Image (cartoon, grey):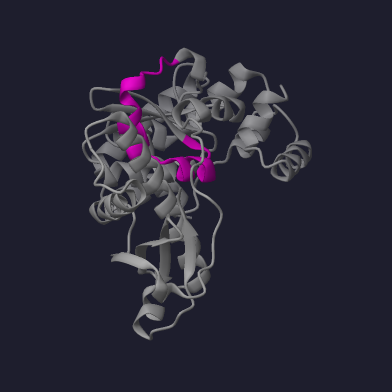
Amino acid sequence: MIKTGQIMIQEGLVSPGDVSLALDIQKKNKSNGFKHGSHLLGMILCQLNLITPLENFYVLKKHHKLISVMDRLCEGKTATRSRLEKIKAEAERKAIPFISFLLEKQIIPKARLQQVLFDLFGTPLRSVSDILFDQTCRKDLIAVIDRELAKKSSIIPLHLSGNILTIGLTDPDNLLFVRNLDLKFPQYRFFPVFISFSDFKGFYPILYPKVKPTLSAPILIQHPSTAKSAGPEAISNPKLDKHLIARLFIQYETLRLGHEPRNNNETYNYRLALFADFIRDSYYKITAQSGCKTIHFYVRQQGGRAMVIAKPADKSRNGSEGLVITSAT
């Protein structure tokens, strides 16, 4: 079986000399009973600043060499495997991350779990109450992880100081996601911390406050040709097509108000953000239903109401009247 050191060399992360040095340290740590150091070669390479914990996690996961939290707890005789497997199954039924379930149900002492997580992943376990939330950073934080992605992945940005962005994880596999963020946002240095699921649920509405919905349920227009229209805007990626969404918003607001909106106040920015969320949600629903990745969005007015109409691009090309209609008020 290929050893960790060989894998790290093959991946081009370290040199044979680096591995030899880490092995010497590992041997010394073993002689003192691992009281003052790790017994895992990857984490020793991290401590030597030769690789990062994210690189270590990614490579070991890729090569199926990663030790799981359950394995480590069994190895240390903290709990039996059969008991932990039952606990994990219960956590999955309740849709709670395994480490959070262990922590919140006080199945494993917090200090022990904290040590295991740091030993395996080089990532600390923190309480969100220890982190000061800066309202002025909200926009930067949600630009990295938006509301839907945070909810889906149970991962949340917590704090930004300079270029260091602290990000809360509820599961070790979230580290793969952080690695992707690291590649996507090179301007930041990501500092991951593990948090409990209850902390995640408590902080989520603080970072992503609820807004009063001003967008109504879908409405079907049987004869769209009778309505006044503007557009269309062809949107293929809501995150990149922000200028198209902004243009669509101005069309919508102009029909709604009877004049072009002023863009120098908080109300405008608030409604634009809400409108963008509306378009993004509509886009993903329609692409999921139709399989078409480009959606044409129109603004129309009927019966004195401004409406946003969405239609897959392939249906627009063949002249189909099978519109997916949504409205905003």
Instruction: Please name the residue shown 43% across and 56% down the image.
Output: 304
Question: Is residue 143 one of those drawn in magenta?
Answer: yes
Question: Is residue 28 shown above or below 145?
Answer: above
Question: Is residue 218 shown above or below 36?
Answer: below
Q: Position of residue 139 (x, y in %)?
A: 32, 32
The quarter holding residue 199 reads top right
Provide the residue span drawn in magenta: 131-155
Q: Position of residue 183 (x, y in %)?
A: 28, 46
Instruction: Please name the residue shown 45% across and 16% down the image.
Output: 36
In front of the other: 43 or 22: 43
Q: Position of residue 80 (x, y in %)?
A: 75, 34
Name the magenta segment's main secondary structure: helix
Task: Report the side of 45 relative to 213 (left or right).
Answer: left
The quarter holding residue 49 reads top left
Residue 323 can be seen in this image: yes
Instruction: Please name the residue shown 22% across and 40% down the image.
Output: 186
In front of the other: 319 or 10: 319
Instruction: Please name the residue shown 31% across and 36% down the image.
Output: 269
